[in-house]
Image (cartoon, coloured by chain):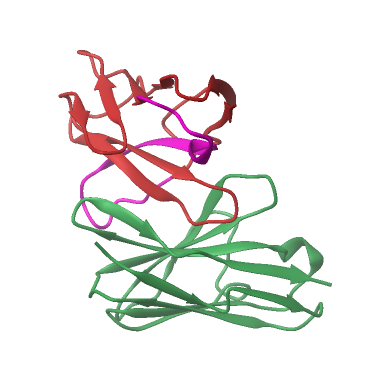
Chain colours: A red, B green
Amino acid sequence: DAKTTQPPSMDCAEGRAANLPCNHSTISGNEYVYWYRQIHSQGPQYIIHGLKNNETNEMASLIITEDRKSSTLILPHATLRDTAVYYCIVRAKTSYDKVIFGPGTSLSVIP
Amino acid sequence: SAVISQKPSRDICQRGTSLTIQCQVDSQVTMMFWYRQQPGQSLTLIATANQGSEATYESGFVIDKFPISRPNLTFSTLTVSNMSPEDSSIYLCSVYLDGQAFFGQGTRLTVV
């Protein structure tokens, strides 16, 4: 079973920040938080990951709470092309740890 | 990064037949993963394929239905056997490299 819970859907106005929450209250000390997204009819795409510190890259920012039980993915200026299903996943950073997907959050960016 | 090529990208098959899906990676990887994504659903892990050993299947998936080959560190195949309309899904392969999971674009299978 997936170790995360996310809202099933969200809307965001184009140009505004999209804040996608994720709860992972049973996360272990060696598990990272990963975010992927899947645009319709494509394979999932890696966005960002983190252990306990906040992370930022060219796509998004990841804010992890101090107790590591929840996190928020931030798309700073959402565009229509960001409409996708976003998956929050926790896993250890090893090649043999499975990636288990939950239902994700379907984000709709509205003009 | 890793580039994953899947073949075929889509197919329409008759029930009772089998289809073999190929997955080629441009890097050597220890594990390859096969997923199924039914219409409107999230990805479900079918099995983990390790080079040189039998694949490990998740609950609800069996080797007779989804045989997997892993002949080397860059290639794997998944066969969907004795297909029925319920097997209509997108099948994706995935690898894990440098802290990230990479996915192929998937094989869209329709069984009629």
Asked if residue A1 can be seen in this view, the reply is no
Placement of B48 over or under B76, stated as above or below: above
Asked if residue A67 can be seen in this view, the reply is yes
Residue plotted at (68% across, 82% down)? B18
Placement of A97 over or under A59, stated as above or below: below
Which of A63 and B55 lies nearest the eye of the viewer? A63
Residue stretch rendered in magenta on the structure: A76-100
Which of the 4 quarters of the picture holds residue A75? top left
Q: Position of residue A82 (x, y in %)?
A: 48, 37
Q: Position of residue B84 (x, y in %)?
A: 79, 70
Residue plotted at (72% across, 64% down)? B88
Outermost left residue:
A53
Outermost bottom residue:
B71
Outermost right residue:
B112
- Relative horizontal placement of residue B15, taking residue B6 as reference (left or right): right
Residue plotted at (64% across, 45% down)? B41
Image quarter in which the C terminus of chain B is found: bottom right
Magenta segment: does it hold B21?
A: no
Placement of A72 over or under A45, stated as above or below: above
Image quarter in which the N terminus of chain B is found: bottom left
Which of the 4 quarters of the picture holds residue A19? top left
Residue plotted at (33% across, 69% down)? B3
Q: Position of residue A57 (x, y in %)?
A: 22, 36
Q: Position of residue B24 (x, y in %)?
A: 38, 78
